[in-house]
Image (spheres, rainbow, N blue to C red):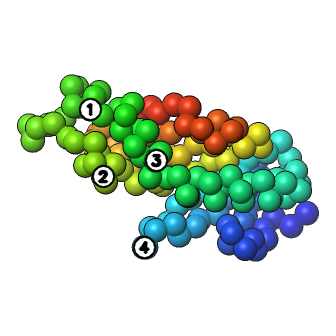
């Protein structure tokens, strides 16, 4: 099996045997690149189901701004009560503008995680938004 191939949606996908997933980088916003991991039990299984991964990825991109709002709904109060500096409370719109997606991990069952750069809101931790197999936002938390 080849350890890399060109995909019309993901670009060059490279199989990372050490991690057991396919990886690529996709430009999702002007001058912003997002790392993407496609995970599965076997490398060949991911390729056999690539259309499902593409659809999940497209859905994530279409709903990414809503994922930011979901994260803000879950984490903004925590930020304003425990993490903010002397500048005053942060509004939902400001929170959403500051965080940026850095990595998207799509699993075999089509659950996914979006990992956001927190712009130092939480001292450099990442913000993780979990998406269930039906494409619904399931959870948002501070990680790392």
Q: In this picture, is 34 found above or below 125?
A: below
Which label lies toward us, 4 or 3?
Answer: 3
Q: Spatial distance from mark 1 to mark 4, Cα to Cα?
A: 28 Å
Q: In this picture, is 58 found above or below 89?
A: below
Q: Spatial distance from mark 2 to mark 4, Cα to Cα?
A: 16 Å
Q: Around disc 2, counting alpha carbons within 10 Å, would you say few (fewer than 14), some (14 to 19), or many (20 or more)?
A: some
The answer to the question of whether label 2 and label 3 lie on touching residues, with beta carbons closer than 8 A, is no
Q: Residue at x 73, y 64 (%)?
A: 14
In the rendered structure, the answer to whether residue 103 lies left or right of residue 38 reads: left
Residue 68: x and y in percent read: 42, 46
Which mark, residue 35?
A: none
Q: Spatial distance from mark 4 to mark 3, Cα to Cα?
A: 21 Å
Closer to the N terminus: mark 1 or mark 4? 4
Which mark, residue 98?
A: 2
Q: Which residue is mark 3?
A: 66
Q: How many marks?
A: 4
The answer to the question of whether label 2 and label 4 lie on touching residues, with beta carbons closer than 8 A, is no
The answer to the question of whether label 3 and label 1 lie on touching residues, with beta carbons closer than 8 A, is no
Q: Around disc 1, counting alpha carbons within 10 Å, would you say few (fewer than 14), some (14 to 19), or many (20 or more)?
A: some
Q: Around disc 4, counting alpha carbons within 10 Å, would you say few (fewer than 14), some (14 to 19), or many (20 or more)?
A: few
Residue 46: x and y in percent read: 82, 53
Would you say residue 111 is visible in this rendering?
yes
Q: Around disc 3, counting alpha carbons within 10 Å, would you say few (fewer than 14), some (14 to 19), or many (20 or more)?
A: some
Q: Which residue is mark 1?
A: 79
Q: In this picture, is 140 found above or below 2?
A: above
Q: Which residue is mark 4?
A: 31
Find residue 8 and report its image quarter: bottom right
Label 2 secondary element: helix
In the rendered structure, the answer to whether residue 108 lies left or right of residue 119 reads: right
Q: Spatial distance from mark 2 to mark 3, Cα to Cα?
A: 14 Å
Label 3 secondary element: helix
Q: Residue at x 30, y 34 (%)?
A: 76
């Amino acid at each position: 099996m080849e350890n890399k191939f060109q995909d019309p949606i993901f670009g060059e996908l490279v199989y990372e045997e050490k991690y057991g997933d396919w990886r690529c980088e996709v430009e999702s916003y002007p001058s912003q690149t997002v790392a993407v991991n496609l995970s599965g039990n076997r490398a060949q299984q991911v390729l056999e189901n690539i259309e499902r991964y593409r659809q999940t990825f497209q859905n994530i991109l279409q709903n990414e701004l809503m994922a930011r709002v979901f994260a803000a709904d879950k984490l903004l109060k925590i930020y304003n009560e425990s993490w903010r500096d002397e500048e005053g409370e942060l509004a939902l719109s400001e929170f959403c503008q500051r965080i940026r997606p850095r990595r998207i991990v799509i699993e075999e069952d089509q659950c996914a995680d979006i990992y956001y750069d927190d712009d130092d809101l939480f001292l450099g931790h990442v913000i993780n938004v979990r998406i269930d197999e039906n494409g619904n936002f399931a959870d948002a938390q501070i990680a790392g």
